[in-house]
Image (cartoon, grey):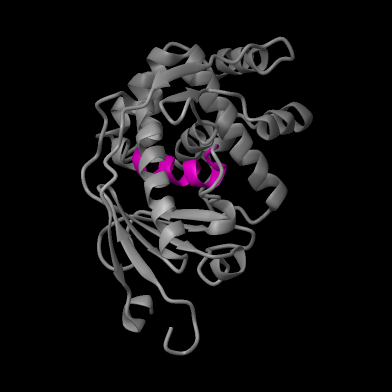
Amino acid sequence: PAEGGDPWREIRSAHFVVQTNLSSEIGREATLRLEKHRRAVALAWGAHFDPPGQITAVIVRSKRELEEFAPAPLVSGYFVKSGFSGSNPAIVLSAQSFVVDASPMTNHETHELAHYLSAYSIPHQPRWVAEGLATYLETIELKNADTQIVMGRASRDRLAEVRRRGHLSVDDLWSWNGHEHDNAKNSLLYSSSWLWTHYLLNQQSERFETFQRLLQTESKPRKAWDQAFAGISHQELEAGLSKYVGPSSKWPIWTLPVPAVATQLTETPLSDADVH
């Protein structure tokens, strides 16, 4: 700021430390929005799932500013397990992908919150599970003055892609290491991870729950998969998935009440050193 940049501020709530160059009013709205949406996304793991601690959220004004920090071009937000100033995890967003005056949650916001919460619940998840859960949960909608959520809607864009291009096999997904530079292939990896997760959650729920439970302690995810899905072949899973994604398929949707969240906030200005 001393060199002509926007002033930065830090806004703290029960679960977030928001560092932003947005105005005080919009920054506070964004912080409360994050609290509401964190509570909504956490319902995927049950009404009593409420991880302790705070997560850092860095929100810059524009995508152009975000490009200085984004790990790859065209990224609208990302999650890191260890933050910028200590061990806290962090999500990074631009205000252009985080519209605080709109009622629906944005995909980028819920996607990154889902990464944070799923990493807490499932510490040993492979890349396709992490992205599959995040893309499944990014379609969550808040309804009725933020008192209910709708979960499980099909992602229109991802569904259109897998129907147009076909989906990758689960073996293809296991080879995803997170360093794919082909944008078309990368897009299909995300869409296929979403489709497999949607299918397994709804059609193989007991096995998938066992798989997630094993990933809490099993550091070798493929071993956890083989144990959870013993007795069913990949060919049987593929056949079920092909039927699931067909034109006559129905996508299970869940409506859940959202508990109220704490609204107390504290705000402090950030020094030039803190901004750096």
Which residue is outermost to the left? 52
Q: Is residue 214 visible?
A: yes
Asked if residue 210 is positioned above or below residue 187 in the image, the reply reads above
The quadrant the N terminus occupies is bottom left
Which residue is outermost to the bottom? 3
Which residue is outermost to the front? 25
Occupied quadrant, residue 257: top left
Q: Main secondary structure of the magenta part?
A: helix
Q: Position of residue 86 (x, y in %)?
A: 25, 65
Occupied quadrant, residue 267: bottom left
Residue at 61% x, 33% y is: 192
Q: Position of residue 273 (x, y in %)?
A: 32, 82
Identify which residue, 134 or 43, lies in the foreground.
43
Q: Is residue 7 left or right of residue 184?
A: left
Residue at 54% x, 38% y is: 103
Q: Position of residue 116 (x, y in %)?
A: 37, 45
Asked if residue 230 is positioned above or below residue 11 in the image, the reply reads above
The quadrant the C terminus occupies is bottom left
Let me know if residue 105 is in the magenta part: yes
Let me know if residue 142 is in the magenta part: no
Asked if residue 69 is positioned above or below residue 113 in the image, the reply reads below
Identify which residue, 238 or 114, lies in the foreground.
114
Q: Position of residue 113 (x, y in %)?
A: 42, 44
Residue at 46% x, 25% y is: 149
Q: Is residue 125 visible?
A: no
Q: Is residue 23 left or right of residue 262?
A: right
- Tell me where the magenta segment starts and ends, as one range: 104-118
Identify which residue, 216 or 268, lies in the foreground.
268
